[in-house]
Amino acid sequence: MMDWDPEVTGRNAILAQLDGLVPLNRPRWPTTAELNRALAGALPVAFIDDDTFAGLGCCYEQAVARGMVPTRAANWHDLFGALIWYLFPRSKALLNRQHMEDIARAGAKTRTPRRDRITHFDECGLLLAVPERAEAEALLREHDWQALFIGNRARWSRDWRPFIFGHALYEQALAPFVGLTGKAMVLEMAPAFFGLPPAAQYRQLDARLADHLARQDPFHVPRPLLPLPLLGIPGWWPANEDPGFYRNRDYFRPRRDR
């Protein structure tokens, strides 16, 4: 576990997504009480420490359903989890309700395929906001990395906008590595979305995602998400300014059926 870093959002462009949106510029690790004061006022949950969680006598998702998110002290993974709750409260609450639906049917100790897929998105999910879904989704599905990242390079700074959802991706971004990959869900957003300030974009994106998850329930089916190599995103990694970066087939892998 890495030490506390008050300048964490300045490490790279991935972590810079959090800059100005969440209170991280502080001299030491925040306690759960400090997180609650800073983040939880408008949330459907509060953050609790290990001792409080142990006293509940239930599993993690059941605690969340009771409005309490277990959050370990001095732990980047759980801190980023708390920040995602702040940025996506409606979507996180919806995912917890879907967990609880399966727990009601199968019990807390049984990991259904749907719950595994929800957890995968919760840990490693990335949202790609676009004005029109078909093209970007087709390129991701085909693993056409040249067209996605080079042929459409200008679009990434204009109207193809990636947003981290999985808190494990932020943890991995503390020390990025070739291989760092998100599991993408492509969401269509109105053209006006792309001109909004970041905080307003997150509010609209959270509402759009929660509606999509409720209406489509994508985790009922296998492989609902599409791999997206994060270091290939223009502006997110200096090495990808060289087109040769994308020739690494161990990272930018072709589809298996090719």
Image (cartoon, grey):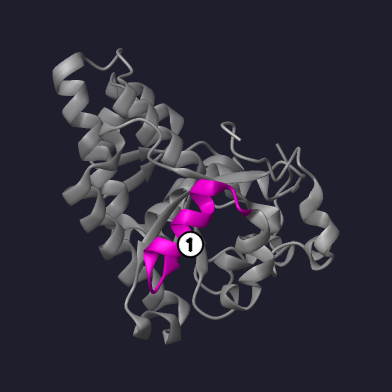
235 vs 157, left or right, is: right
Q: In which quarter of the image is residue 115?
A: top left
Q: Where is residue 139 in the image (x, y as percent from the top left)?
A: 53, 56
Q: Nearer the viewer, residue 97 or 237?
A: 237
Q: Is residue 79 visible?
A: no
* Callout 1: SS: helix
Which region shows up in magenta?
129-144
Q: Can residue 88 be seen in this view?
A: yes
Q: In which quarter of the image is residue 51?
A: top left
Classify mark 1: residues with Cα within 10 Å, few (<14), some (14-19) or many (20+): many
Q: Total label count?
A: 1
Q: Nearer the viewer, residue 257 or 59?
A: 257
Residue 133 among those drawn in magenta: yes
Q: Position of residue 132 (x, y in %)?
A: 38, 70
Q: Where is residue 5 in the image (x, y as percent from the top left)?
A: 72, 56
Q: Which residue is drawn at 28% across and 21% down?
A: 58
Task: Say which residue label 1 marks.
Answer: 136
Q: Nearer the viewer, residue 108 or 211?
A: 211
Q: In which quarter of the image is the N terminus?
A: top right
227 vs 99, left or right, is: right
Residue 137 among those drawn in magenta: yes
Q: Quadrant of the C terminus?
A: top right
Q: Which residue is drawn at 56% across and 65% down?
A: 18
Q: Residue at x 65, y 41 (%)?
A: 254
Q: Which residue is drawn at 80% across and 68% down?
A: 241
In the depicted structure, whether residue 47 falls above or below residue 60? below
